[in-house]
């Protein structure tokens, strides 16, 4: 059996398993709410691994190792910022969001939660947030398809477009019919595959180079500053801005709909504790593996004199050189798992944004069967538009993901935090802040360096603009509301494990 036959066999097994899980979820999904949120029945381990896998997209297996390979440990601040942000998200946001979304008229989407939490009768907040979701998720899904196409170019010396289409079709296969439950259950398998691959490849590479000492020496021969978290001895203003930008990725967690929707789907608020411990353990192991792959790759390709044309392919290239073809096939499957787990979650949240937050706002009362059909149609349409955008990619995977991550973090992050922890937020404050955050991300991405003179990650000014505008406008428009105060108190009590008696 040829090397490629082994690799294809592993991928076929992986694809078949994903489709099988999707079919199982399809049989368990009977209505629109089940399709969107899985009936709020996710156990802690499923919620944790699903949140992690849907978070760590193709950039974990390709973008982050590539950035470490190209620039060194200074890029590890992304991993540090993400770990801190994810921990705080699980600790503070998860239990209260789970309780508050149920208290606020059993909200099953982020836009509907914002509307119900703030008693917005204008519907403007829900429509605007639904539109923002669709726009940024289309870019995000497009970045996943770019990663899928690039993967097939290296793995099989194949066509970028064929890889793009294949990844889209298989992901659609289990997402279109399995819905939220299908995406969550496949995420669990995909998350385990990603972690194991990222731990296996660097261990084998270290052995091939000759051990830890030889690996460190090889990195120093290429560039001693690659082993520094500050990029060398001179901590310049440019370096400081770069570190702030990388660590600021952690701010994005509070506003990522495809991640925090897992909090809403947990069985109860108390599940957040065990889910946090499981999720953060998985995340630390996976991120350490990704950083190690990029760093060890520097020494490996230098010492072995192999050529690496694209830094973002360092994990794939090392696995092809070092591992048995069948194992290589499963490493490749893990890369696809990283891409597909995020893409499936994003498609489901896009679907919910369209059906729940746009169609139902303007449309008539519709049967559950029709809503289910509309949700599936939206999944297909978003995938098609994202596919068109991905046909001719103009940037790296990491940069494409960074833009969408900043868009969500700056648009929704402050709104979610203020909704959960500040009584004084108003619907007009939340709306003005979200629009300000989204606009600043777009403007800063295009003109930020020219305006400010520094290359600061757009999530920082976008997040701050949202926060400041939301607080100012809320102060100007706030009116006391006894019902909102009662719901706020009830959500806090439920999050803390207190039993609440219905009035």
Image: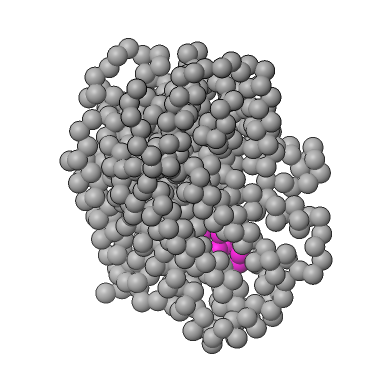
Examine the structure image and report whether residue 464 is included in the region drawn in magenta: no
The residue located at (21%, 51%) in the rendering is 20
Instruction: Using the rendered view, name the quadrant where residue 182 is placed.
Output: top left
**Side of 211 relative to 218 (left or right):** left
Looking at the rendering, the stretch of residues picked out in magenta corresponds to 62-69
**Residue 55's x, y, as percent?**
46, 49
**Residue 87's x, y, as percent?**
51, 53
Quarter of the figure that contains the C terminus: top left
The residue located at (34%, 51%) in the rendering is 44
**Side of 226 relative to 249 (left or right):** right
Question: Which residue is at the far left?
Answer: 27
The residue located at (78%, 46%) in the rendering is 454
**Residue 250's x, y, as percent?**
58, 49
Q: Nearer the viewer, residue 172 or 154?
A: 172
The residue located at (80%, 40%) in the rendering is 452
Instruction: Using the rendered view, name the quadrant where residue 8 is placed.
Output: bottom left
Where 74 sits versus 139, above or below? below
- Is residue 158 at least partly visible in the picture? no
- Image colouring: one colour
**Side of 235 relative to 355 (left or right):** right
Quarter of the figure that contains the N terminus: bottom left
Where 65 sits versus 143, above or below? below
Q: Nearer the viewer, residue 216 or 104?
A: 104
State whether the magenta stretch is mostly helix, strand or loop.
Answer: helix
Where 154 sits versus 43, above or below? below
């Amino acid at each position: 059996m040829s090397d490629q036959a082994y690799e294809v066999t592993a991928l076929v097994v992986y694809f078949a398993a994903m489709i099988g899980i999707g079919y199982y979820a399809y049989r368990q999904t009977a209505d629109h709410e089940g399709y969107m949120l899985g009936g709020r029945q996710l156990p802690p381990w499923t919620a944790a691994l699903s949140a992690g896998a849907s978070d760590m997209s193709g950039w974990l297996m390709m973008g982050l190792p590539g950035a470490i390979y190209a620039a060194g440990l200074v890029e590890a601040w992304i991993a540090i910022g993400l770990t801190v942000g994810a921990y705080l998200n699980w600790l503070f946001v998860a239990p209260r969001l789970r309780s508050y979304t149920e208290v606020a008229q059993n909200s099953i989407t982020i836009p509907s939660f914002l509307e119900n939490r703030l008693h917005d009768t204008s519907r403007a907040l829900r429509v605007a947030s639904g539109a923002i979701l669709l726009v940024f998720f289309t870019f995000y899904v497009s970045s996943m398809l770019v990663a899928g196409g690039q993967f097939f170019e290296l793995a099989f010396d194949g066509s970028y477009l064929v890889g793009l289409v294949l990844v889209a079709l298989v992901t659609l296969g289990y997402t279109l019919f399995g819905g939220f439950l299908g995406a969550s259950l496949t995420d669990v398998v995909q998350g385990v595959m990603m972690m194991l691959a990222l731990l296996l490849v660097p261990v084998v590479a270290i052995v091939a180079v000759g051990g830890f000492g030889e690996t460190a020496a090889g990195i120093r021969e290429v560039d001693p500053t690659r082993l520094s978290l500050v990029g060398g001895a001179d901590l310049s203003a440019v370096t400081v801005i770069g570190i702030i930008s990388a660590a600021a990725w952690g701010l994005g967690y509070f506003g990522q709909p495809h991640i925090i929707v897992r909090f809403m789907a947990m069985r109860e608020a108390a599940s957040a504790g065990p889910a946090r411990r499981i999720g953060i353990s998985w995340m630390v192991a996976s991120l350490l593996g990704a950083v190690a792959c990029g760093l060890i790759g520097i020494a490996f390709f230098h010492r072995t004199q192999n050529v690496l044309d694209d830094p973002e392919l360092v994990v794939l290239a090392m696995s092809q050189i070092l591992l048995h073809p069948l194992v290589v096939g499963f490493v490749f499957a893990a890369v696809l798992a990283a891409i597909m787990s995020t893409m499936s979650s994003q498609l489901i949240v896009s679907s919910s944004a369209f059906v729940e937050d746009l169609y139902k706002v303007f449309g008539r009362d519709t049967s559950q069967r029709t809503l289910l059909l509309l949700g599936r149609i939206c999944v297909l349409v978003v995938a098609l538009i994202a596919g068109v955008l991905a046909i001719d990619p103009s940037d790296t995977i990491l940069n494409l993901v960074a833009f969408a991550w900043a868009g969500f973090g700056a648009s929704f992050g402050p709104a979610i935090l203020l909704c959960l922890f500040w009584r004084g937020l108003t619907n007009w404050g939340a709306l003005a802040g979200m629009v300000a955050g989204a606009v600043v991300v777009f403007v800063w991405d295009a003109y930020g360096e020219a305006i400010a003179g520094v290359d600061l990650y757009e999530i920082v000014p976008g997040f701050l603009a949202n926060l400041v505008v939301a607080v100012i406008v809320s102060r100007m428009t706030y009116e006391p509301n006894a019902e909102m105060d009662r719901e706020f108190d009830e959500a806090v009590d439920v999050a803390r494990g207190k039993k609440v008696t219905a009035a």
